[in-house]
Image: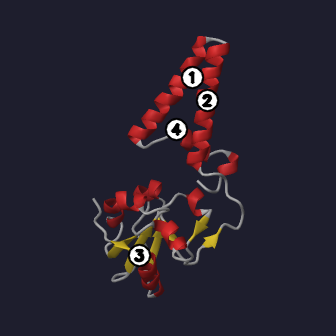
């Protein structure tokens, strides 16, 4: 699956200090919480519309996400965006922080992560559907079924309409 080797945070830091390019593939709302200074932002969701990694010939590229898993799963797509030697930051920014390496914290409090917002809205809709189905009319059970179908669709396709809509809410603008 992975076409790139993993690299430890300390080894990655040494490469970055020698001129390697660090690329953050997390979404804007995640990056707003914390980032590694000097990293380039290439969100995975927009990878197809972005050009190649801004690295010169002979430069090394290190890709990272939050835990390293997203980078590992998408290693082939990421490798296609660079023509240089490339690595995956093992453990992502979480491992970077655990190794005591510096990050830049958000200048202002960013909104709650989109996935958590989706869980709150979806869970509230399911609960409302069940309660209204019990106390008002059985037709309300269809609301819970509809939300469940939407979650299954999101899991199968990787596209979540609710997340798409929530990213455009006023409190999330500028982070999506």
Identify residue for label 1: 143
How many C-alpha atoms fall within 10 Å of the one at disc 4: few (<14), some, or many (≥20)?
some
Q: Earlier in the sequence, mark 1 or mark 2?
A: 2
Q: Is residue 81 placed above or below 120 in the rendered structure?
A: below
Q: Relative to the observer, which residue lies in front, 171 or 104? A: 104
Gap in Å between the C-alphas at discs 2 and 3?
A: 42 Å
Q: Which element type, helix, strand or loop, lies under badge 1? A: helix
**Helix, strand or loop status at disc 4:** helix
Give the Cα distance between marks 1 and 2: 7 Å
Residue furthest out toward the bottom: 18
Q: Tell me residue 56's x, y (percent).
A: 38, 80
Q: What kind of element bears circle 3?
A: loop
Question: Dot 1 surroundings within 10 Å: few (below 14), some, or many (20 or more)?
Answer: some
Q: To which residue does mark 2 refer?
A: 125
The image's mark for residue 8 is: 3
Is disc 1 in contact with disc 2, using a CB cutoff of under 8 Å? yes
Q: Is residue 156 left or right of residue 28?
A: left
Spatial separation of the CA atoms under disc 1 and disc 4:
16 Å
- Tell me the crowding category of disc 2: few under 14, some 14 to 19, or many 20 or more residues within 10 angstroms, Cα based: some
């Amino acid at each position: 699956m992975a076409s790139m080797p993993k690299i430890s945070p300390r080894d990655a830091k040494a490469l970055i200090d020698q001129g390697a390019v660090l690329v953050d593939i997390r979404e804007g709302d995640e990056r707003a919480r914390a980032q590694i200074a000097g990293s380039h932002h290439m969100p995975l969701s927009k990878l197809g519309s972005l050009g190649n990694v801004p690295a010169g010939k002979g430069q090394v590229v290190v890709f990272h996400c939050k835990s390293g898993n997203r980078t590992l799963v998408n290693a082939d797509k990421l490798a296609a965006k660079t023509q240089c030697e490339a690595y995956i930051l093992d453990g992502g920014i979480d491992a970077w922080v655990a190794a005591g390496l510096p990050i830049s914290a958000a200048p202002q409090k960013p909104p709650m992560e989109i996935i958590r917002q989706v869980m709150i809205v979806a869970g509230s809709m399911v609960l409302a559907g069940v309660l209204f189905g019990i106390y008002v009319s059985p037709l309300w059970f269809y609301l819970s079924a509809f939300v469940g179908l939407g979650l299954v669709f999101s899991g199968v396709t990787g596209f979540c309409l609710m997340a798409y809509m929530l990213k455009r809410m006023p409190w999330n603008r500028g982070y999506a």
